[in-house]
Amino acid sequence: MKKFFLVACLIVLPAFVFSTGASALTPDEIIEKASLVYYYGGDDGTASVKMTITDRAGRVRVREVTMLRRDVEDGGAQKYYVYFRKPPDVAGMVFMVWKNIGKGDDRWLYLPAIDLVKRVAAKDKRSSFAGSHFTYEDVSGRAPGDDTHEFIVGGGEEEFDGRPVFIIKNTPKDADAVEFSYYVTRIDRESFMPLKAEYFDRGGKPYKTMVVEEVQDVQGIPTVVRARAVEEGRGETLIEFTDVGYNIGLKEKLFTERYLRKPPRKWIK
């Protein structure tokens, strides 16, 4: 999920200027830039999120949440707060993440039906988020330092959906911590927006794809407003973002256990 802040930062420069500058970047530098574009728009932000989940049998469920995010520092620690609005069986549930750099993230889940705050173990970060085809880690983002990065053969360049892109293979440094063997990302050469990620299992077969379907400019910040995750033989989840806002002045105290049981009504619509 998240991730939730995707964008098209289309700086109008002559093509040869962009090509020359971008080609000088290493895969590590490109991934760092892509992470900043995707996950660090503004100093903080909010969005209404609708997830349409279709399972392998074609059954459809819809979940709606409000997401809040506050950056501690660009490219570094972040805090996320996700409040579930619909359907009634999950309304009032809250998921909170403190994204850390250099160590595991801290995650909490509040279950209002039993008034329980549960810590989400680090080993569960690759589990399904709210029954969707996105993982907990997809919501807050995978740290670039968790993987090694390399260009695909040919300099990792091609077009995707009419846009020139970098193609980078990402291999986890700790293979036992994840369910995939590697994943391949296609990143817009101009905006550095990740447009597609394809995950491969330990047998080398692709099993999951995440694609950004629409990017809009919000307050001058390229923002993903529509994305889709598809798992081979297991259905898909369409995620749509509305009412996106940046630099709204979220206080750090909102991202504490106290506000799991007492949602900040000013921001939860």
Image (cartoon, rainbow, N blue to C red):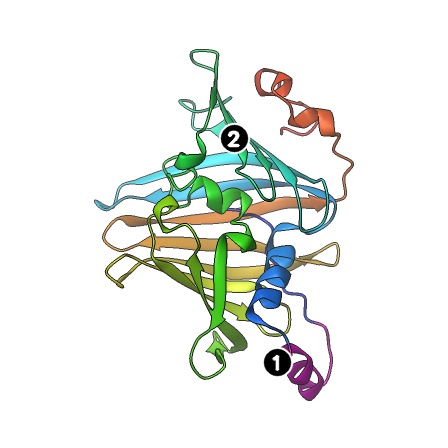
Locate residue 137 relative to residue 202 in the image: left or right. right
Q: Quadrant of residue 43?
A: top right
Which residue occupies the foreground of this view, 167 or 261? 167
Which residue occupies the foreground of this view, 21 or 268? 21
Q: Quadrant of residue 163?
A: bottom right
* Count of numbered marks: 2
The residues colored magenta run 11-24
Q: How far apart are labels 2 and 1 at the CA level?
A: 37 Å
Residue 18 falls within the magenta-colored stretch: yes
Element assignment for label 1: helix
Report which residue position mark 2 lands on.
107
Q: Earlier in the sequence, mark 2 or mark 1?
A: 1
Q: Position of residue 98 (x, y in %)?
A: 60, 34
Q: Position of residue 223 (x, y in %)?
A: 63, 55
Report crowding for label 2: few under 14, some 14 to 19, many 20 or more residues within 10 A (C-alpha): many
Work out which residue is located at the far bottom of the displayed protein and give it. Answer: 16
Residue found 63% across the figure and 28% down from its top: 268
Report which residue position mark 1 lands on.
23
Which residue occupies the foreground of this view, 205 or 112? 205
Whether residue 244 is situated above or below residue 120 in the rendered picture: below
Q: Quadrant of residue 172?
A: bottom left
Residue 64 falls within the magenta-colored stretch: no
Going by the numbered disc 2, the residue's amino acid type is Arg
Locate residue 197 relative to residue 233 in the image: left or right. right
Whether residue 168 is situated above or below residue 246 in the rendered picture: below
Report crowding for label 1: few under 14, some 14 to 19, many 20 or more residues within 10 A (C-alpha): some
Element assignment for label 2: strand
Q: Position of residue 229 (x, y in %)?
A: 39, 53
Going by the numbered disc 1, the residue's amino acid type is Ser
Residue found 76% across the figure and 39% down from its top: 248
